Each structure stands twice: as structure tokens, then as C-alpha cells.
Amino acid sequence: MRTETGQVTSLADYRPTDFVLERVDLTFELDPTETKVEARLIFHRREEANPNAPLVLDGDELVLSSVLFDQIEIDSERYTATPDSLTIRDLPASEPFEITITTLINPEANTQLMGLYRSNGIYCTQCEAEGFRRITYFPDRPDVLAVYTVNIIADKAANPLLLSNGNFLGGAGYGEGKHFAAWFDPHPKPSYLFALVAGDLGLVEDTFTTVSGREVALKIYVEHGKEPRATYAMDALKRSMTWDEETFGREYDLDIFMIVAVSDFNMGAMENKGLNIFNDKYVLADPETATDADYANIEAIIAHEYFHNWTGNRITCRDWFQLCLKEGLTVYRDHEFSADQRSRAVKRIGEVRHLRSEQFVEDSGPLAHPVRPSQYKEINNFYTTTVYEKGSEVTRMIASILGKDLFKQGMDLYFERHDGDAATVEDFVQCFADVSNRNLSQFSLWYHQAGTPHVTVSCDYDTNAQTFTVKLAQTIAATPGQPDKKPMHIPLSFALLANDGAMIAPASASGGEVSENLLHLTEAAQSFVFHGVPERPVLSLNRSFSAPVILNFTQSSDDLALIARYESDLFSRWQALTDLALPVLCEGVKQVRAAQPVLFNDALKRSLLAIVADDTLEPAFRAQALALPSEADIARELGGDIDPDAIYAARKAIIHDIAVAGLDIFKGLLAQMATDAAYTPDAKAAGQRALKNAALAYVVQAENDPLKAAEAYAKANNMTDLSHSLSILAHHFPGTTETKAALSDFESRFANNALVLDKWFSIQATIPGEDGLVRIKTLMQSPKFNAANPNRVRALIGSFAFANPTGFHRADGASYSVVTEEILAIDKRNPQLAARLLTSMRTWKLLEPQRAGKARAALTTIANANDLSNDVRDIIDRILT
Ligand code: ARG
Ligand code: ZN
């Protein structure tokens, strides 16, 4: 494990390597505990480099067996080897030379799941960001691109399958009981895209003919017996390949594309060239075991990793500060893909919900950092929603500022200009500046300034002059290391609505750039005046969430109700409902804390029920409307002195009230959406299920009776309905006979399916109330739980810490102690997983004082522990500051 180094890596220190790596030849003799890795590396010194500079290679927990120079053992004075570096001196000034390094590694003991490890008997790798240096000494940085040949030797019976990047060269027997395979990847790549897989797996095969007529073999490898559950992933892959050709003109570039699903994986998946490795959670699906959300995630992640082939692999990052160059852009591409495959508006609502609940929280707390950071202590801690999701939003803003055609031209230019490069964010932005002749320097602040901009809005209508003035002011709070911010270029999509809901087209506008329904806010304060506006309009601002900002805009309930009723942008209708709901919920929290009854006016109820009852609206949208702001949303809105119990109680009371008022509607929907049709995972069917299930939750809460949920559980013919009814039972009627029966039925029915049991873990881990702690402690003892598997840990401990506010933040602080103890234990095995779990406490300072004190004490225990990983040390230092 890499323990705390305290070292800071700075963007300002970037400089190219002294040596150019020309070729890489790797030979692996696989063995579960003693794998031999021989790396033959051909280098030459860069012309500009100091002729005496030594070659310094990265390592991490490596054991060197030997090092050769041009096939001859080097004098021990000429090199220095430590577990984390190999330095070789006295190297040629200009001519190429070969270094051959042999290391011994232990895949079985690799519990941090970085480098080469074993998962359920399968050898696999994860090299991004800095895992390759755990395999061999190497210039392990993304700007070192080389062509790789890989030879794999392994026991044949245990490992019939030997895979690596690129195209298969050939294979043969190799001594007693062994065989070998050779792979060649013609595309120069950085080490983080290297992959190797060996083992015994089942295969699902297909082919794809590219737009220029080349046939590509598609192979998805999963554990034997799970092949039928990989067909949806295959379908999603083919749709992704077609979409990238049609939308971005990107064609696949090898003869084979492989996906391997493994059960132990720190993240979602990895885009290794030609050989993507996936967390099996994002590959395996069938109606009996996967929910609609699982299907949507699989589709999105398959697409995401495939899209990386161009945005990430063909054009990679110069250094890890540029991570958003590939991640933000690729998230944008997968969002657009899903929007095209499904309902764009519903997809957008989901994206914004996620952005606000994760990224906005990150951006306003101790872990805030720019989309393109300039310093890090541990790069693994920068695979964040800021880099990914805010990075995607920044790309989206470029698209809306430039418009569809210019954005396409800019992307084309990027692919043309930088194919084969290790590029920077500046390179990317320059392409859009060049095609549009726009100066994007102010816009680029989105990459460099952390924090979510707040935009204050006020409006004024002048009847006599028929002008409508929109006054905007922007601010960004200080974030770590950035006390002062400059005004940003914020593109705000808008509409002016008349009293009857029709759109008003003003004759002209002044005060700043206004183009195609976009207000370009560029000053700290700016007034836009619309002329020729015949009546007082209602302003709908930030339509489709054109900019990732927080609007401070107090609109009357009447105005919000009008938007909720008439906006043609469905996102804005949902947003108006949210804006009606949040003040009601926050007021409810105050009432609960003052021990008063929770009372609220009818505007919210009326607007909400009207939308829910409107058959002309797509069911998935109506379901989104019914999912009122979450407890975390309310906490964010309150902004401090958080009492999770009061939030829970207020929200529950308000939902109960709405449920009672709309009972007939909800019952009607339950009947109307019920269907005997066989399950299909498409967006339309999923939307109907979502509405039916939302209605079920309201009916059950209105009646305060588990009966209907128990019935739904009994007759469910798919995992969406089954897990939904189970969570209604568990969350609203814990401990009842109905709930106990359903939980134990679920457990025995899926006893052999770990991914499905994760749902069982997480449903129980999120049952509200302080008993949650006892429950997760008991579940951790379950034979089904395995603390070494990241999916299990996230399902149980992660769900509890991130998604059970009343349980995790119980007032006596007991949950904090248990979870921090667990984090310390996990840190010994898997620092990345531990660091991720620890971020669940990043908002501790916003809690009411008693809880905040308990949280601080628990965090201090972590801070005082010895031998923390670099990952956990970095997070704890920032959170506690
Ligand atoms: N590049 C991967 C993706 O598609 C993420 C891999 C990150 N892995 C890590 N260990 N930090 O988003
Ligand atoms: Zn990615």
C-alpha cells in the first residue's frame, strides 16, 4: 500500500520526459502468487534532454529480479531500485537502447485491486491512473505513448483464455500443461490503458460492421452460466457503435472489441484499448435480476467506455490534471447517447438531480476543486463528480453557446487536430474558439474556478414602456485555495411566458448578448432589457438546466404554478414543482423542530396532482414529479444546522398529506399502469413501471397499511417491481410480519446471486431510524457479506453512510464510530474504497452542533491513526480543515 507521502503534484511542474519510449514488449508468466513479468522497453533520449539525465521509472511495491541493458546485466552501481522507483544512469546520449526489467508480483495478495489482481479466480488488471507501476517499473504517465506486444504464459486448464489489448497474434502450447498467447496493439497508448485478462470465462459473441464496411468481432466474457445475462450489454454496445458513427462520425479501429466482467472492481468500468474491463454489476442483466435503473446504467456505462475509444484513447490526456478532458467529454457523450435512446427530458431531470445531490455538495464543501485541478496529493481522489459530471456540464455549455453545427465542427476539428496526441484542456477549447471565432477565455474559468455560481435574479415589468428587465448578479463562494473568484460566462436559456402559457417573443433585447433564447451573463451584475413585451411575462430561466448554477430567484407560487403547467420544456416544469416544494419542505422542518404540526398551503398539491393526473404527459416524467426533493436536497437547501430526524419527519408528513389528497388519482394510476405484458427494459415500459411504483408508494403511505405493497411483492414478475415493493415494505413497515416474510423470501430466492443480494443489503441499510446501525452491524456478520468485495461494501456500508441520513447521523454519534472503524479496516486492504467511503462525511460541518461534534471526534480518530493510505490521508486532511 502506498502510505501517506504528503507530496503534492502540481500542474505548473509539468515537463516532458527525458526519454522517449518507442516500444514495449511484455511477457507474463502467470501464477496466482508469483507472477513473473518481463518488460523489454526500447527508449531513446530526447534531443532537448540533458545528456546525463538518468532514466527514472515509477514503481509501487515492486520487487526487482533483474535489469538488463541491451540484453546484458547492468552493473549494480549503474542503477538504484526501491519498491517505488528504478533509476538507471549512464545511458546513451542519442541512440536507442533496450532495458529489460524482470519483476515478481503477487496477484492473489493484491487486495487494493490496482495493477494485476485476481477476482474470483480470474486474472485481471486495473491500471488507471497509476496501477501499471504495480506490474513493472515504467514511465507510468499518460503522455508516454508506445506500441505494445504482450505475451501471456499460463496454466492451460485453469486459464483457457488469455487476453490483452489489440489484435490476437497467435498462441500455442508451452511446456507441460501451459500455453501462451501473443497480442499486438498497433495503436500507441499510455500504460494506464494496458489490460490483461486470463482465466476461464463464458463468451457471448456478435459482430458489428462499421460504416466503412469493416467487420469487428464483439466479445463479452462473463462467468460461465451467466452468458444469457450479457445479451443486453451486447445490444447496448452495438447501439453505441452505431450512435458514435452517426453522431460524432467516429468509427471503431481494431478488428476485435472485448468486454470482460469481473466481480471485484473499484469503479464502474475501464476503457482499456480493445479490452474493456467492467464491474459485473454494469454488464449482467435479465428481467428477473436487474431493475430498470440497472438496465439504464448498463447501457450508459457500456456506451461511456466504448466512447472513450476516441475521447480518451485515440486522444488521451497529457497529464492527470487533464482528466476532465476525457471524462467530462465522455460523460457528455454518454448523456447525449442515453437522451437519444430514451426520453431526453426525463434523462435531463435525472442528470440534474444527480449533479445537485453529489457535485453541488462537493463543490460547496471542503473537497471542492476545479474541473481542471492544478494540484493533487492523490490522483485517485480526483475521479469525482466535479471532474466527471461538472466536466460534462461544461462541455454541454460549449455546445449551447456555439450551437449544434459549430459544436460539431469544433469536435471534428478536435479529432482531426489531436488524433494520437496526449492533449490538454486548452487544446480542446481552442478547437471551439477556432471554429466559432469566439474568445472563450472567460468561458474557460469554468475549468479553473471551483464552486457553484449563485445567480441572483430579479425582474421588473414596465407597463407603459412595455419593457421587461431581468437583473442578474453572480457570485461564487470561496473554495479551498481560491478565496476570490472572477465573473464567469454563464449561458442561461430562458423563455417569457404569457398569462395563458403562450411564449412571448420580445421585439428586441439589450444589455448584453442574447442569442437563440440564451442570455449570456458575463458580468458580475448585468441587466437585460426586453422591448416590446405586451404583458407582464413570467420568466422561465435556466431551461433544461443550461448552466450548472444555483438560482436565487424568488418566484410567486402563481408564477411557478404557471411554469409547472405550461412550459414546453419539461425540465422546467419539473423544476417549477421543485421550487414549489422546497420552501414547503424547509418550512416543515422548522415546524417539526418547533414541535408544531406540519401545515402547508395547497399550491404544491394542486400543481403536483395536476401533472400526475395528466395522461398526455409521459409516465416517466410524472414519476419524476412524484419523487419530491430528497432528504439530502432539503438539507442542501437549508444549508446548515442540519437535523436529519426533523427533515425526515417533515418530508414524511408532507408526503402523507399529498398522498391522502391524491389517493383516488394514485389508486387510478395503480390500476391503469398495471399490465400483464412480459417485461421489456425499454424506456416506455420502464416509465410506466416507475409511475405505477411511485403511485404504489403514495397509496401505501396514505392508507398506512403494508397490504398493497405485500401484494405487489407477491405478484411482481420483474426485479424493478420486486425490489420496489420490498423497499416500500422495509422502509415504511420495518419489523412487520409482511416485511420479515418478504425480506427472507428475497434472501433465499437470490441466495446465489451476489449482485441481487446487494439490493437486499442496501434496502435494509437505508431503513430510516437509529436502528439502522444495529441492522448494518448484524448484516456485516452475514455469511453473504464480504468486506473484500467493493460492491458488497458499497451496497451495505456505502448505502448506510451515503443514503440513510437518520441512521448514519443518529444523534449519539454511534454510527460515525462504527463506520470510521470500518473505514480504517478497509483502508488496510483497499485504500481507494476506504477514501471513497470517507467522503460520506464531507458535509459534517453543516450538521447541528451536537452531531457535528460527534462527527469531528470520529474523524479525529481517523486523522490520528497510523499508517493511513495516501488516499485516506488526503481526504481526512481536507475534510477536517
Ligand atoms: N476511466 C474509468 C472511467 O471510465 C475510470 C477508472 C478510474 N479508476 C481508478 N482507479 N481511479 O471512468
Ligand atoms: Zn470514463
Image (spheres, rainbow, N blue to C red):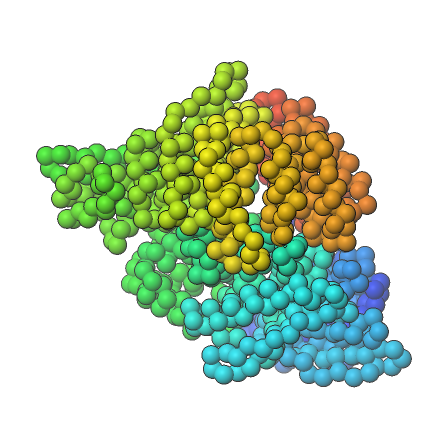
Which residue is at 74% across, 74% downward? 162
Which residue is at 64% across, 24% downward? 811
| Residue 298 screen position, x and y as percent | 58, 59
Res 68 quadrant in image: bottom right
Task: Identify whether 114 is placed above or below 622.
Answer: below
Task: Identify whether 87 is placed above or below 391.
Answer: below
Say if residue 210 shows up in the picture: yes
Looking at this view, is 26 or 258 the one in front? 258
Relative side of 140 to 179, left or right: left
| Residue 564 screen position, x and y as percent | 35, 40
Which residue is at 13% across, 39% downward? 466
Res 501 quadrant in image: top left
Which residue is at 70% across, 41% downward? 742
Give the quadrant of the C terminus. Answer: top right
| Residue 149 screen position, x and y as percent | 68, 78
Looking at this view, is 664 or 177 the one in front? 664
Q: Residue furthest left?
A: 464
Say if residue 870 shows up in the picture: no
Relative side of 573 to 136, left or right: left
| Residue 81 screen position, x and y as percent | 77, 62
